Structures are given as structure tokens and as C-alpha cells.
Amino acid sequence: MAEVLVYVDHVDGAVRKPTLELLTLARRIGEPVAVALGAGAENTAAALAEHGAVKVLTADAPEFAEYLVVPKVDALQAAYDAVSPAAVLVPSSAEGKEIAARLAVRIGSGIITDAVDLEAGDEGPVATQSAFAASFTTKSRVSKGTPVITVKPNSAAVEAAPAAGAVEALSVTFSALATGTKVTSRTPRESTGRPELTEAAIVVSGGRGVNGAENFGIIEALADSLGAAVGASRAAVDAGWYPHSNQVGQTGKSVSPQLYIANGISGAIQHRAGMQTSKTIVAVNKDAEAPIFDLVDYGVVGDLFQVVPQLTEEVNARKG
Amino acid sequence: MSLRIVVCVKYVPDATGDRHFADDLTVDRDDVDGLLSELDEYAVEQALQIADEADDAEITVLTVGPEDAKDALRKALSMGADKAVHVEDDDLHGTDVIGTSLVLAKAVEKTGYDLVICGMASTDGTMGVLPALLAERLGVPQVTLLSEVSVEDGVVKGRRDGDTASEQLEASLPAVVSVTDQSGEARYPSFKGIMAAKKKPVESLDLGDLDIDADEVGLEGSWTAVDSAAERPARTAGTIVKDEGEGGKQLAEFLAGQKFI
């Protein structure tokens, strides 16, 4: 059976959920061979094996942390040369997409980014994508070279599928460009204790209607009652009420959770672009004409300062 | 010596229009008004600020696209860029990102550059990989997704806010940079700028000028194939209730029914 390279996104050996989802998709196409780089790479093996990786190629070197993107491209290319895979799958993070794109040019292949589903096809893997603010769904394939495809979080279920997951050291020779862009300092993002926005099963967002940074507490309280991530519309971020890292929409994160709760968000096209593929959509807005209500499974026309705390209280009561 | 800045921009269908695909499954550019991609305005803005800080700088805006794409160049010129290069060729129709990066790389080399600045992504394709592809093809450092950028003594520095960390980056010129929408509000063209833009030079290049064969680009030469494009079915109308004091509880009831609580 053909092998499929899966690039592993991990933090010091802890495999992030989108990579486990990738393994589910990779098994539809062939046998997953994982590539894990940097500090803690070998510690990823157990989780990867449990989810179907037949092999785990690992490499660690200071270059991976000290220079931007290119050392990882060099390593992924070394894995590509060693394995000659049928396809290369990479998580659709900002960095993942850049790594995938550079690899594609190097190996003379086409690239598809931000797939939301993947299936085997007669002419190679077929990727489903959302286009034009998720108003269209396209099916595409790479028509030249070995398909390089990046996949968005929440595109597949994480499934246990135990495999050997044998760890093999990957030999990497860095290119002249590897040290081109130096990372002179790195400040880890402060943990909020909440799930990562793009990976969360539930996202609770606030917009212009929240009317001030000090009011985001009620959005956070609802999120915490549901174990959800917190999002914000561009209007709320531009006003300085919530960090840009939480922005949902065209110029922020694109999310596709099981449940999306929009509070005080009108639903402009730029916002819809980032959340329209959510499975269930709920909105609270005082304007009955707000376009967000065209998308919802359930909507409450009302004052979010009344409705949201009541909902939070009710959720907590039902949990208790 | 003059700092040569090339800003790559894209002419895109207006995101607030009714965007759709043409019969050959390329982006339909006829039925929706086009404009300079909003995210590229940030690239033009940062180029102008970097040029202001430099002793001597020249900004060239570069686009690949049909005749109408000149509108995007004019907008950038009216914001303050010095000159423009328009790569236009019928054989380019349907070119994908790998092909576009080839064309841009050749055009950037032909123009001459110390610094290439791009937006973080286009507002139509939204891939966000072109700057990395350009750096790969040009063989120069990639300093991408910057929320802050500065250039001094032949070194570009900037801040990249990633998913898990914020990083300070540094590279020697020549380099390819991309900037995010957090890099600073783009200026509006002044009346004077709009008038001046009409007199600024726009050079037209075709594939022959760039020594690119037609079969390396276009729909036929594309590295990817779109097999189908279907409009997402409208979501079935949901239940909308007016809050009469029990809205939060009703919502909780709905969520419980869906097994979210």
C-alpha cells in the first residue's frame, strides 16, 4: 500500500489534535508515515502510532527553532526523498501552509490548501474546499507531481487505529537558505486554559454588541460553562476589546466547530467567511434584521446582556 | 543607494459582491466588480512607510492579471507608489498559485528589487502561500505574516504573531516580506495622489518578456484541477424567538435538545 507523509504539528512532543485528524484522512489514501521535527519529536510516537502511523520519522536540531520555516521544509523534503509517498498532508496552520507550499515547488508538485475533506480518487486524492466565504464547495485534485495538501482543523474525526509507529531518525541536510530568517526571540502566548480556537468543538463569540472590553467577561463565562473557545468579530478586535488572535473571519481564524454561538455579531460577509461551515449556529442579537439570523439553527432576538448570563446560569445549573 | 521595493498586489472580485465560478471553474471576474485586494492595501502602506524612513527608495507595484487589473495598480499608485508593472497575457487565464508565483518571481527579478512586500493572503483565493512561494523561487529569506515591520541598514525586522507564540524575526535584504491586517491602517488616496497617479508609468509585460512558455501557466498548465464547484445549499431556516425574559432558558433548552449540554 502506498505511503502518505503526514507532517506533525506538536508542542514539545504533545501532538495537536489536527494532526490526529490528518491521520484519519491519510488512512483513506494509504499508510501514514509521520514526520515530527524539533524538541520532543520522539515523544510524539506513541500518540501517532495509536492513530495509525506505521512509521514516525524524527529529527531534532537547533535550526528548527532558531530559523523560520525553511529548516522544516528541508526536513520534510528529506522525508519525501526517503519515502517517495503518494501524497503529503500538512495541517493548515499559517506555518504549515508555508512549509507545504515551498515543498510543492521544490518537488515540482501542485498544492491544495485548506481542504475540509479528503477522499481517495481514481486520479489521486480529491480534496473538498470551501470558497468565497464558504458560499461554494469545490472538489479539486493536484494534477502534477505528488499531491501536497493542507487540511483545516475539524475536517475529520480522530480515530484510534493502532499501528507500529516505529521511530526512525531522519537525516536532514540544511540548505543554504535554512538560516536566512533568524528568530531572535519568541514569546509564548499566554494560556487562557480554554481550547484552541480553530480546534474547539464549541466557539462562543462576541461582536460589536458586546460594547466594550469590560463586557467580554460574560462571553467568557458562557464559553467556560460550555468548555468552549472564545472568538471575536473584527469590529470587536478593531475596537481593542479582544485580542486579534481570537478574531474569527476573513482576516482572522476560520473555524468549523460543532456549535458556534454568535453574540452581538451582525454577520457581515467577512465574519461569515470564518464561521459559516460550523455545524450548528446559534445567535443572540437585538436586531431582528441582522444577517446572522439567515444562518442560524436557533436565534434569540434580544439583549445579549440579559440572554447570555441567563443561558450561562442555565447551562451551569443543568451541569450541576 | 536607492532601496528598491516591489509590492505584489492582486485584483480581486469584491468580497461583498455575489462571487461565483465561471463555466471553466475559474473565478468569474466579469459579473462582480473588481478592486485592489483589501489585504494588499496593508502591503502598499508598509512599503510607503518603509520608503519614508529610507534615505532614498522607489516603490514599484506589480500585478498579474487581466486588463482590468490596472485598476488595482492605479489605486496603489494613487496611495503613493512610484511606478507599476502589469503582467498581462491571454495565456495566463486560469493560472494557479504555483504558476502565479513563477510569473511574479520572473517579473520581480526583471524589475530589480531589494525588498518584496506582499499582503498576507488574497481575499478571493485566500491561500496565503504566495509570499513563501516567491521567497522559495527567488532564493531569498522569507519574513512573513508580520504585524510590525522595519528596515534599517539592509536588515528587515518584524514581529510574527503565530498560533502559539509571538516571534521577532530578522533577515538581511534582499528578502520577501508579507504583512497582516494588524500592521497598520492603510491610507486613503488623496485627491492630489489620484491626479498624480494618472501620470505615473505603468509598464506592460507579457509571457514572452519574462521568458515563460505558455504551457507553464494557464488553465492547461495548472498544477491543480478543480473538478466541481457547487453552491452551498442555503441553510434551512432556523427557529427565531424574541426574548420575553426567558430567551436564555429557551436557548439552553435548544442546546440540551442538540446534546450540547
Image (tube, rainbow, N blue to C red):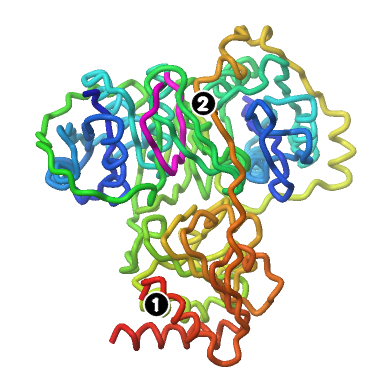
* CA neighbours of label 1 inside 10 A, class few (<14), some (14 to 19), many (20+): few
Q: Position of residue B220 (x, y in %)?
A: 59, 15
Q: For the residues labelled 2 and 1, say whether their Cβ atoms are less than 8 Å apart.
A: no
Q: Position of residue B120 (x, y in %)?
A: 55, 42
- What residue is drawn where x is 64% and y is 11%? B210
Q: Which mark is residue B134?
A: 2
Determine the image quadrant of residue A142: top left
User: Relative to A164, is B218 on the left or the right?
Assistant: right
> Can residue A211 be seen?
no
Quadrant containing the N terminus of chain A in the rendered view: top left
- What residue is drawn where x is 56% and y is 20%? B99
Q: Is residue B246 above or below residue B213?
A: below
Q: Name the N-terminal-most of marks 2 and 1.
A: 2
> Can residue A314 be seen?
yes
Q: CA distance from mark 2 to mark 1?
A: 50 Å
**Viewer-nearest residue: A74 or A317:** A317
In magenta stretch: residue A117: yes
